[in-house]
Image (cartoon, coloured by chain):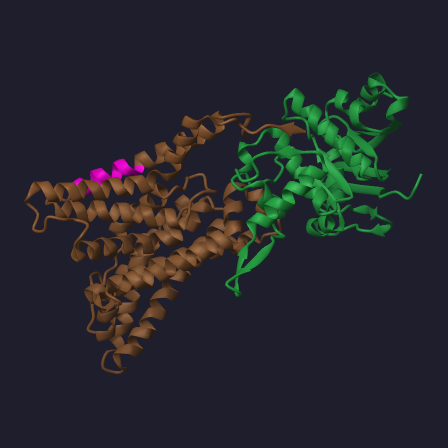
Amino acid sequence: MAVNAPQATRSNEILKFLTKAWSWLFLILVLLFFELWSRFDGNTRVNTFIFNIASVQSVLLYATQYLMMALGLTIVIISAGIDLSVGFTSGLASVTAAVIIKNLTGTLPDYLSFGLAVIGGILMAMLFGYFNGLMVAKLKVPSFIGTLGTSGVARGVAFLIAGGSTVAIKNTVAREFGNGDLLGLPIPVVIAAMLTLVFHYLLSSTKFGLYVYAMGGNFNSAVRAGVNTTRLTISLYVLSAFTAAIFGLFYMGRFSGGKPDAGDPVLLNAVAAVFIGGASLTGGSGTVMGTVIGALILAIIQFGLVFIQLPPFWQFIAVGLVIILAVLIDQFRDRLIRGGGSGEGR
Amino acid sequence: MSEPLLAVRQVDKRFGGTHASRTVSFDLYPGEVLALAGDNGAGKSTLIKMISGVYTPDSGDVFYQGKNITGRNPQDVRDLGIETIYQDLALADNLDVGVNLFLGREKMKKVLGFLPVLDRKLMREEAKKALKNLGIIVNDLDIPVRYLSGGQRQAIAISRAVYWNAKVLIMDEPTAALGVPEQREVKELIHRLKAQGVGIIFISHNLVDIFDVSDRILVLERGRVAGERLISETNDDEVVKLMMGAA
């Protein structure tokens, strides 16, 4: 049964490469754009965008925010689901942790109350993640609607716990956690980098990761392989809530306070980072490294626009356009490979 | 003939008021292709699901290599060597051939002496061998299987089963979604499996296909066995009459 693979022409190969590597190229383009602008415009305080430590640090901090929320989201999206609750579960985590610290200040040393707050914040978020997972896996609620519901619940609970506004704290360890440096890099960036490596390993090299891809590609293939799809699905939403909680804790450390809607403005960018990174809404594709690139692109746009002193509202336009571009390229790539030969598809 | 590979004895199943299977019995021998024919609702699906462990019969037994396997769960039944290939093939379309062949029984290796990682290369190489054994050549082993043709995908689902030592293959309409050249490829593959001693239950609506590949035919009609014939001793007319309950 000899069936030949599509005979790809050279130009076809180049196109395929471009659609695969576009996010890298785009990253370079965006960097070049801001670099050239700052060199020739003369309005910026420093005349280089890339080669100054302040902008590198700022970009990394922005990217870290998106990435924390997007890491867990990446695996959920690969499994053909989505988690829209991370915006408010992260805020809920920040508020929960802040309230714990506030109540323990004076009774316990700072590092202890901070430690308990971290545990409390993460557990609170994971509880919501677990509920998301149960809904999607057991009750077969579509994740888009189900997590939107959870998002509302988390929002309400967060405001109730916080008493309607921000919860300010005084804790040296928390402040160091959000603002300190380690090896010349902000601590949140270092922690995010480590978590990214762990998630990359999980997704690309373990059975767990493989089953996530299988479930996203064809649910029945995972069932047939004997995968406990219920347990797997629940664990994905718990992980998603976990990384969202880390975002909330970074926020609490950085601003010395918990805020119920801390994560809300970041949700769109986090989702965008995942799709720019090559994920598709139908599931089965996407990578952690792709999401990292996506987060970096968005962070560069966000900070770059401030850097070159354009009105910040341009960022919404830019991010919106990049999302659309990402989806178009995703579709084009599929057609390109399909169009090449004998594949008649599903 | 030798011992039957699979022996189904008097299996009976009701769903509420519907008598989906009425004391059906048959045997399947190694290297034999048994066609299961019947109109929609004749009980073909119910019958194969009682073999594959999806349903448990109300009464009656299923024996595999002489052992009673009635009431085992689907995973158990497949581990024993009875594999059902449904029309959707249960392939992960976004993953490559190697991984699809090993999904659920992955090969791992250690990196840096302690970190376990998937051994994709080994799985790909093993997949290549497994496919070659069945005379299937797929050039692009590292692209997602959704980019392969329907016939190739069918072949991958079949070789996955055989690689894990399936002795009985139940194929649900394997040629239904395929073009004519690919139908021929799948039929050739069935002949090769036969030669290797695999017993095949072949479900099809297409009498031409049935007469092409089968040795025997079991016709079901409203849950009961309407007739069992050797392919060499029957013809289209008789089979159609049996299917309609007129013989």
Provide residue B58's location: percent of width, then percent of height.
78, 46
Residue drawn at 33 percent across, 63 percent down: A191
Provide residue B36's location: percent of width, then percent of height.
78, 31
Chain represented in brown: A
Residue A223 falls left or right of residue A10: right
Q: Nearer the viewer, residue B245 or A91?
A: A91
In reply to whether residue B9 is colored magenta, the answer given is no
Residue drawn at 19 percent across, 42 percent down: A315
Q: Residue furthest top?
A: B237
For the C terminus of chain B, which image quadrant?
A: top right
Chain represented in green: B
Provide residue A237's location: percent of width, then percent of height.
43, 54
Residue A268 picture quarter:
top left
Residue A306 falls left or right of residue A338: left
Q: Residue furthest left?
A: A43
Reply above or below: B60 against B208. below
From which residue to which does the magenta span run?
A313-323
Residue drawn at 75 percent across, 34 percent down: B44
Q: Nearer the viewer, residue B132 or A90?
A: B132
Provide residue A179's location: percent of width, then percent of height.
21, 66
